[in-house]
């Protein structure tokens, strides 16, 4: 049992929770305890988590602001959906889904690299504008496609899939996405990525290949956005380009920001919460009350932001901190935390939004010996 | 010729009409501690920026171990063996001290580990991580930061942040280490400590050091040879005592 004690449980907490949730929900669904509306909600949550985790790599760890995440998802949804329509009669249900997921992901990843290339030249706000435009371009291209190709403004109808299995597959894929993201971040490559976020000039001077790592992050991030898109197309039976507008990109960004940038677990929780709220509000507020959906959504967001940042609430939060409540039950043993192990895998990254948004700190600082010659003129 | 690590020939750069540095000829021998001094705005940091690839020189070229590196990118120049620290400290603030150093170790051939092995946690990943951590600890021990290794680098006091920058630069295994005002903001005690560390680094890591410094005691106590710059041109070159007493240098500093 000594071996078990040495495992750093904190590192695996998100895996364990997600895996347990998957198993429990799978059992429940086979037992017939889940309504189809619950299953739809679970699929939505899984898709949101995947989107938030993949975006948090770009925003939280690479430190670039991307507002076109829905665009990558849109590519995955349409191309995966189309693949499914074409291959369904040939391959059957499961192989088709498999091929669609991979193909949707890979094509989205290729576009991720294409968008990553300007990212090497642009910073902060400018990159945000480019990605925003990219998302809108993708959307309007699919909207104006011919009826035979991608369904145009009517949308693309995708094959039906056994609903009960889909959310399990989605949750397993989320787990896969999480493993890849976490492992990437907590490796030497992840260190290189976070070093670019912390100080790009120093990263370059330390010999980090900034170009390579920016492209890797954009590629991996958009791959998972594409996969999420394919899941979306299966979950909805139909893909409507109108759903992938910039509002959706912003919504994903809100999940990442609310969860705490640089915190993958936070992104997961925020994504699940927001999606849950969103879907529940849609079902509760119908008819004339439908207009209140956005109002409630906005109010809850505002309250959450206040709770996170208001100085008056800080004392309250510290007093009733969950980890502190747990700490009471745990015996403190300083001998076990003497080496790097204790803090090793913590990526201490509470970065502020304005740090991401600022074009470059050095431009505004009074003494700037490292200005590039272009800025000098 | 082989004992010359860095050689520059009429190296110069102008920003628009301003000639920041012109006609700089340096020859730094292997194992030397070379100083670059001069009043504010003399162009010392600009020289650093040129030889580390931040700026592309408009005239002249420079060679590291006989290899022309003029106009190469910062990454390439670092891979070839020039590492630097910054005058205004540029650490990776949200990372712990040891991780800062491990970023420096990133490109060392002995710590090679592909993206694939990292993502799928193959044995190579654990092996390199362990080796990198051990090496980083060794380097931190040299600069005396071993005890602080798990602190966030932004929480370190100023003097220690400077030492950490040196450690990070050292981790890239450079042939030439460029220190931009390493003693700035340090008290006399810390400065003396730093002098010891710099000497120790030169001997233990077999590295040539080029440093910019305003503290004349530091320079004359440490450097084998110096170059004095003013308004981008060389005023004097040679051993510290001689160069610092050159009439042109005295005039540039005290006026008259």
Image (cartoon, grey):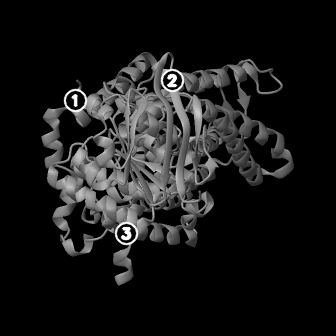
The residue where tag 2 is placed is B14
Can see residue B51? yes
Label 2 vs label 3, nearer the camera: 2
The residue where tag 1 is placed is B254
Q: In the structure shown, which secondary structural element does the residue marked by tag 3 occupy?
A: helix
Q: In the structure shown, which secondary structural element does the residue marked by tag 1 occupy?
A: helix
Q: Tell me the tag on residue A36.
A: none
Crowd tier of the residue under label 3, counting other residues whose Cα lies within 10 Å: few below 14, some 14–19, many 20 or above? some
The residue where tag 3 is placed is B138
Q: Are marks 2 and 1 in contact (CB under 8 Å)?
A: no
Q: Are marks 3 and 1 in contact (CB under 8 Å)?
A: no
Mark 2 or mark 3: name the one nearer the start of the chain: 2
Tell me where residue A105 appears, x and y as whole percent.
Answer: 67, 44
Can see residue A273? no
Tell me where residue A56 appears, x and y as whole percent.
Answer: 47, 41
Marks 3 and 1, Cα distance to the nearest angstrom? 43 Å
The chain that hosts pointer 1 is: B
Q: Is residue B160 above or below residue A236?
A: below
Q: Which of the pair B178/B24 is nearer the observer? A: B24
Q: Residue at image x 26%, y 33%? A: B250
Mark 3 or mark 1: name the one nearer the start of the chain: 3
Same-subunit check for callouts 3 and 1: yes
Q: Is residue B189 left or right of residue A262?
A: left
Label 3 vs label 1, nearer the camera: 1
Crowd tier of the residue under label 2, counting other residues whose Cα lies within 10 Å: few below 14, some 14–19, many 20 or above? some
Mark 2 or mark 1: name the one nearer the start of the chain: 2
Q: Which of the pair A155/A332 is nearer the observer? A: A332
Q: Residue at image x 61%, y 38%? A: A232
Q: Residue at image x 29%, y 29%? A: B252
Q: Is residue A139 left or right of residue A355?
A: right
């Amino acid at each position: 049992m000594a071996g078990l004690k040495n495992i750093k449980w904190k590192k695996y907490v998100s895996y364990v929770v997600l895996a347990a949730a998957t198993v429990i929900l799978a059992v429940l669904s086979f037992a017939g305890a889940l309504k189809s509306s619950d299953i739809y909600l679970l699929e939505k949550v899984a898709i949101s988590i995947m989107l938030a985790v993949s975006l948090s790599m770009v925003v939280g760890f690479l430190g670039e602001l991307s507002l076109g995440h829905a665009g990558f998802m849109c590519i995955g949804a349409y191309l995966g959906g189309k693949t499914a329509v074409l291959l369904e009669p040939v391959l059957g249900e499961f192989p088709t889904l498999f091929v669609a997921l991979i193909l949707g992901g890979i094509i989205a990843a290729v576009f991720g690299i294409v968008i990553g290339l300007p990212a090497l030249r642009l910073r902060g706000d400018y990159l945000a504008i480019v990605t925003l435009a990219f998302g809108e371009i993708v959307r309007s291209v699919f909207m104006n496609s011919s009826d035979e190709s991608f369904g145009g403004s009517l949308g693309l109808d995708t094959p039906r899939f056994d609903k009960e299995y889909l959310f399990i597959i989605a949750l397993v894929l989320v787990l896969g996405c999480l493993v890849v993201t976490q492992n990437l971040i907590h490796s030497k490559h992840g260190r290189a990525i976070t070093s670019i976020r912390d100080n790009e000039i120093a990263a370059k001077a330390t010999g980090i290949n900034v170009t390579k790592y920016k492209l890797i992050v954009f590629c991996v991030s958009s791959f998972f956005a594409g996969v999420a898109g394919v899941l979306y197309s299966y979950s909805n039976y139909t893909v409507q380009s109108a759903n992938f507008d910039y509002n959706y990109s912003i919504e994903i960004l809100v999940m990442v920001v609310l969860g705490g940038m640089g915190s993958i677990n936070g992104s997961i929780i925020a994504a699940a919460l927001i999606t849950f709220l969103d879907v529940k509000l849609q079902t509760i507020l119908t008819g004339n009350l439908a207009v209140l959906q956005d109002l409630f959504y906005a109010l809850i967001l505002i309250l959450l932001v206040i709770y996170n940042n208001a100085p008056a609430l800080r004392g309250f939060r510290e007093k009733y901190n969950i980890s502190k409540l747990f700490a009471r039950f745990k015996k403190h043993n300083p001998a076990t935390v003497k080496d790097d192990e204790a803090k090793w895998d913590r990526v201490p990254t509470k970065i502020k939004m304005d740090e991401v948004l600022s074009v470059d700190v050095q431009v505004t600082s009074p003494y700037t010996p490292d200005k590039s010659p272009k800025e000098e003129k | 010729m082989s004992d010359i690590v860095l050689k520059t020939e009429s190296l110069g750069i102008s920003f628009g009409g301003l000639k920041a540095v012109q006609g700089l000829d340096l020859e730094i021998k292997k194992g030397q501690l070379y100083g670059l001094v001069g009043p504010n705005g003399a162009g010392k940091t600009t020289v650093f920026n040129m030889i580390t690839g931040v700026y592309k020189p408009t005239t002249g070229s420079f060679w590291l171990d006989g290899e022309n590196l003029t106009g190469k990118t910062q990454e390439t120049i670092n891979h070839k063996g020039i590492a630097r620290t910054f005058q205004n400290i540029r650490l990776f603030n949200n990372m712990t001290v040891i991780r800062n150093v491990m970023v420096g170790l990133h490109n060392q051939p002995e710590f090679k580990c592909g993206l694939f092995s990292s993502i799928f946690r193959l044995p190579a990943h654990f092996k390199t991580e362990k080796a990198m951590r051990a090496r980083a600890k060794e380097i931190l021990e040299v600069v005396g930061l071993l005890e602080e290794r798990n602190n966030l680098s932004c929480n370190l006091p100023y003097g220690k942040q400077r030492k950490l920058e040196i450690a990070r630069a050292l981790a890239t295994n450079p042939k030439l280490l460029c220190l931009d005002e390493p003693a700035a903001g340090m008290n006399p005690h810390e400065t003396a400590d730093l002098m010891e560390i710099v000497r120790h680094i030169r001997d233990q890591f077999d590295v040539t050091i080029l440093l910019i410094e305003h503290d004349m005691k530091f320079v004359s106590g440490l450097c084998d040879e110096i170059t004095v710059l003013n308004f981008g041109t060389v005023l004097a070159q040679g051993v510290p005592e001689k160069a610092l007493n050159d009439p042109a240098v005295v005039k540039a500093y005290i006026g008259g």
